[in-house]
């Protein structure tokens, strides 16, 4: 296949800071030493937590981190290797070996959380408020609060081992199956071999026929594999549902809400308020149909470019724009983003066996993150670069935390990434004087918002409905397609036509297979950021120290306490509605330019 040169072809990450290769003897050393340290930890602490002083419990936490740190780095390394070559048998074999060994080691340590959670109130009171445990205070309180969902040590160990050949294996099969899909697509008079990301990128092609043929072909491959994919989804949802019942959660989504330390009511309010605003989606796409001059707009056309938005961005130009955007906001942000480029911590080219999409990977506070891109030169790729570097900056700011508090809670994990996209957009809009280009930029921003907010809300609503249905009885592929089509129609209303292949879109969403109810974190983060960005515009320089403090807290406090640092009240529906008013203001701006 002939593809346009982007300048990203040789932008590969350097993982030597982690390990030198699959044959690095340090790999076996980490696995062996972690196992030995875990066994020693069990001998020292099992059955004795209630006898510890606060200082001794703090030492136990430090020992846990010294065991976990090397395993985190090893897990990061093998998953980064796998991400750039999902078909390499040696990598897959090493991945399986590391996962098996890490699971065995983790099983040895299961007792710690269980035993701590089961201490009597009188015993536990000795630890509350102790200065020696200040770094772990939130984690201890959360473990205590969630102890009622724990099973016995033996049961927890059985679940960990069972998952290796159960849900983990199903997720891996889904990933390998869908990564293996290749497509023979006719473009510009030539039949070209494409992977899924390349085919989906044609949603931004200026030719409606290309867009519609591409998406029909893409989803048809998932329909062709409906037997396997439907079985995998039913099995994963059923497995999740069984664990929900065994642990005593109120509902399937409660597992994620508990993990995120958010109430079911708060997330339901987020879902309800976002669903209320689907009228903005409907209004926007009617505007876009007018801009495109089409009467039969379909779901394949929702990312269709305006003539001015088909500009190609070489990798170096995107890099310069992103760094300039960070510079316009804050020197520290710029320096941290620049370090990611300078230290070869980005893997940018598209590859036939490379995992699709983009992500930022962080393991331990003492190491900078790594970023994976599939850079094709589209305008959205520029935003994606800013997005993933925002994640990296978030990780670097939270590096002052202990390992246990380093990784941000999921709903807050998208804050810096989305904020960074907005900084980029604002920087570009300020420089632009052409009204037509401004229209293009506003449409691009609104589509990004709807994709990462309303669309994720729709996915979450599908998960709620499909989990309820599957936990009642197994669902056929058509059943799931019907549930998904119903959610599509709620979101888009009469603004687009629904072609049959889009009923299969649910089957192409990795998150709903890999991490049930993960997706609402995107919507949470999106709407949170809109409020924060508006606050930045109003407060200026005085906002930045609060924002950096917010990002530096990692997961050392509850989401409500962390967001309170910048004055946000995530438990009040009016807070979310304020964010939606920001989106409406963007639609209003576009409406004014169109009219």
Image: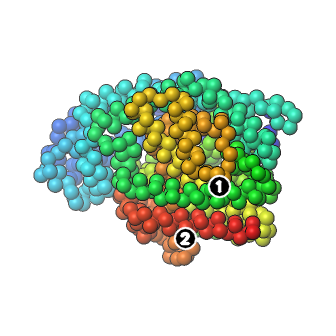
Query: In this image, 4 relative to 87: left or right?
Result: right
Give the colour scheme shown.
rainbow
Relative to 536, does residue 258 appear above or below in the rendering? above
Q: Secondary structure at mark 1?
A: helix
Along the viewing direction, whichever of 577 and 371 lies nearer the viewer: 577
Residue 39 visible in the shown view: no
Picture coordinates of residue 215 (x, y %)?
70, 38
Relative to 387, does residue 541 appear above or below in the rendering? below
> On the image, numbered disc 2 is attached to which residue?
534
Tell me how far mark 1 sits from mark 2, CA to CA: 19 Å
Q: Mark 1 or mark 2: which is in front?
A: 1
What label sits on residue 554 in the rendered view? none
Query: In this image, 482 relative to 202: left or right?
Result: left
Residue drawn 16% across the image and 55% down it: 125
Residue 111 visible in the shown view: yes
Residue drawn 70% across the image and 50% down it: 303
Q: Residue furthest right?
A: 189
Picture coordinates of residue 283 (x, y %)?
64, 59
Q: Residue furthest front?
A: 494
Q: Earlier in the sequence, mark 1 or mark 2?
A: 1
On-image quarter of the C terminus? bottom right
């Amino acid at each position: 296949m002939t593809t346009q040169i982007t300048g990203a072809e040789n932008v590969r990450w350097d993982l030597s800071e982690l390990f030198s290769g699959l044959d690095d003897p340090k790999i076996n050393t980490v696995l062996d030493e972690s196992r030995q340290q875990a066994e020693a930890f069990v001998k020292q602490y099992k059955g004795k937590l209630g006898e510890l002083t606060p200082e001794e419990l703090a030492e136990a936490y430090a020992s846990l981190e010294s065991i976990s740190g090397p395993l985190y780095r090893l897990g990061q390394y093998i998953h980064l290797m796998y991400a750039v070559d999902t078909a390499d048998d040696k990598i897959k074999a090493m991945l399986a070996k590391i996962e098996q060994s890490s699971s065995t080691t983790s099983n040895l340590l299961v007792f710690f959380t269980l035993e701590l959670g089961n201490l009597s109130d009188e015993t536990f009171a000795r630890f509350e408020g102790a200065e020696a445990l200040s770094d772990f205070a939130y984690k201890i309180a959360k473990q205590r609060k969630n102890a009622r969902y724990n099973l016995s040590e033996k049961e927890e160990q059985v679940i960990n081992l069972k998952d290796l050949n159960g849900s983990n294996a199903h997720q891996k099969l889904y990933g390998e199956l869908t990564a293996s899909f290749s497509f023979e697509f006719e473009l510009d008079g030539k039949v070209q071999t494409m992977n899924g990301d390349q085919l989906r990128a044609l949603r931004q092609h200026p030719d409606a026929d290309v867009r519609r043929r591409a998406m029909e072909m893409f989803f048809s491959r998932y329909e062709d594999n409906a037997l396997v994919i439907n079985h995998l989804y039913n099995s994963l949802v059923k497995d999740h549902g069984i664990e929900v019942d065994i642990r005593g959660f109120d509902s399937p989504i409660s597992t994620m809400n508990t993990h995120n330390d958010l109430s079911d009511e708060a997330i339901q309010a987020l879902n309800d308020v976002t669903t209320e605003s689907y009228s903005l989606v409907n209004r926007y796409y009617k505007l876009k149909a007018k801009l495109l001059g089409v009467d039969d707009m379909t779901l394949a056309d929702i990312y269709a470019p305006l003539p001015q938005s088909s500009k190609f961005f070489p990798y170096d130009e995107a890099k310069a724009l992103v760094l300039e955007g960070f510079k316009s906001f804050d020197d520290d942000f710029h320096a941290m983003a620049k370090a990611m480029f300078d230290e070869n911590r980005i893997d940018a080219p598209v590859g036939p066996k490379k995992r699709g999409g983009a992500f930022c990977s962080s393991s331990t506070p003492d190491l900078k993150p790594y970023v994976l891109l599939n850079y094709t030169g589209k305008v959205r790729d520029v935003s994606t670069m800013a997005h993933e570097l925002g994640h990296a900056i978030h990780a670097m700011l939270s590096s002052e935390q202990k390992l246990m508090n380093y990784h941000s809670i999921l709903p807050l994990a998208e804050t810096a990434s989305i904020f960074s996209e907005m900084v980029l957009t604002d920087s570009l809009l300020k420089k632009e004087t052409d009204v037509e280009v401004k229209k293009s930029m506003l449409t691009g921003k609104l589509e990004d918002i709807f994709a990462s907010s309303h669309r994720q809300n729709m996915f979450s609503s599908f998960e709620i409905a499909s989990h309820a249905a599957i936990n009642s009885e197994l669902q056929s592929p058509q059943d799931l397609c019907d549930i998904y089509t119903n959610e599509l129609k709620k979101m888009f209303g009469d603004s687009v036509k629904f072609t049959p292949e889009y009923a299969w879109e649910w089957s192409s969403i990795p998150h709903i297979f890999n991490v049930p109810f993960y997706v609402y974190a995107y919507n949470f983060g999106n709407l949170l950021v809109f409020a924060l960005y508006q606050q930045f515009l109003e407060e200026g320089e005085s906002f930045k120290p609060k924002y950096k403090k917010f990002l530096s807290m990692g997961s050392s406090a509850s989401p409500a306490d962390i967001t309170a640092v910048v004055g946000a009240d995530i438990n009040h529906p009016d807070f979310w509605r304020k964010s939606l008013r920001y989106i409406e203001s963007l639609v209003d701006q576009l409406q004014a330019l169109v009219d």
